[in-house]
Amino acid sequence: MSATTIVHLLRHGEVHNPDGILYGRLPGFKLSDRGQRQALTVAEAVATHDITHVVASPLQRAQETAAPIAAAHRLDVDTDDRLIEADNQFEGERVAVGDGALRQPKHWPKLVNPFRPSWGEPYVEIAHRMLGAIHRARRAAEGHEALCVSHQLPIWTVRRFLEAKRLWHDPRNRQCSLASLTSLVFEGEELVRIVYSEPAGTTDPKVTGA
């Protein structure tokens, strides 16, 4: 019989971002107090799970989210660069969904192809690197559970890829709240089910810094 392995994709908790910028891969963005509580809430929610491998994006907010979960299971946090946030040309700017900032002419050259997208890392490349990280985690935790801490866009993109949906989408409709779990259930190497849960509650995908 094939072993059942679950790979949980955990979005990091809320980030301290008083200026409301799109921080992307910028260094120095840590969890807010609320984000730290969210990480602890998830750690409590998965305390009885058979987690044998914890891995995170190299960014500070992901590492901080992973820490209490790894500690609860007496594990070290591994790092996989493929779990990192998507590259984005708007990084460092105040740009939020629906706030009108994209109507500024200086941004128009970045918006010529929303299907790729032209302003950042191609969706298909995000999906492929995330798949590599997922299968590495699956092998590391075969027959048990792995937990991978990543970011909203990479998690949502790879989920759509696995569900055979088009990768371009409306960011306002992402089902990937702060500290949410997108759990991939494998029988052997075959993905048989995707389960979504929000142990720390629902958050608005339109809010910058969320």
Image (spheres, rainbow, N blue to C red):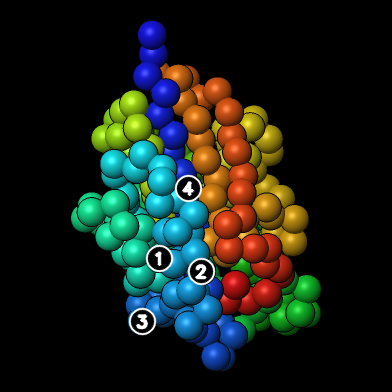
Q: Is residue 163 visible?
A: yes
Residue at 49% of width from left, 64% of height from top?
41
**Which residue in the protein does label 1 denote?**
65
Residue 52 % position (x, y): 29, 41
Quadrant containing the C terminus in the rendered view: bottom right
Residue 133 % position (x, y): 36, 42
What type is the residue that disc 2 sits on? Gln
Q: Are circles 4 and 2 on residues that touch, CB within 8 Å?
A: no
Element at label 2:
helix
Residue at 50% of width from left, 30% of height from top?
185
Residue 156 placement, left or right of 191: right
**Which residue in the protein does label 2 denote?**
38
Q: Of label 4 and label 1, which has the lower sequence position?
A: 4
Q: Of label 3 and label 2, which has the lower sequence position?
A: 3
Q: Are circles 1 and 2 on residues that touch, CB within 8 Å?
A: yes
Say above or below: 109 vs 54.
Answer: below
Quadrant in the rendering for residue 208: bottom right
C-alpha span from label 4 to label 1: 12 Å
- Callout 1 environment at 10 Å: few (<14), some (14 to 19), or many (20+)? many
Residue 126 % position (x, y): 48, 47
What type is the residue that disc 1 sits on? Thr
- Callout 4 environment at 10 Å: few (<14), some (14 to 19), or many (20+)? many
Q: Are circles 3 and 2 on residues that touch, CB within 8 Å?
A: no
What type is the residue that disc 4 sits on? Leu
- Callout 3 environment at 10 Å: few (<14), some (14 to 19), or many (20+)? few
Discs 1/3, front: 1
C-alpha span from label 3 to label 2: 19 Å
C-alpha span from label 3 to label 4: 23 Å
Quadrant in the rendering for residue 158: top right
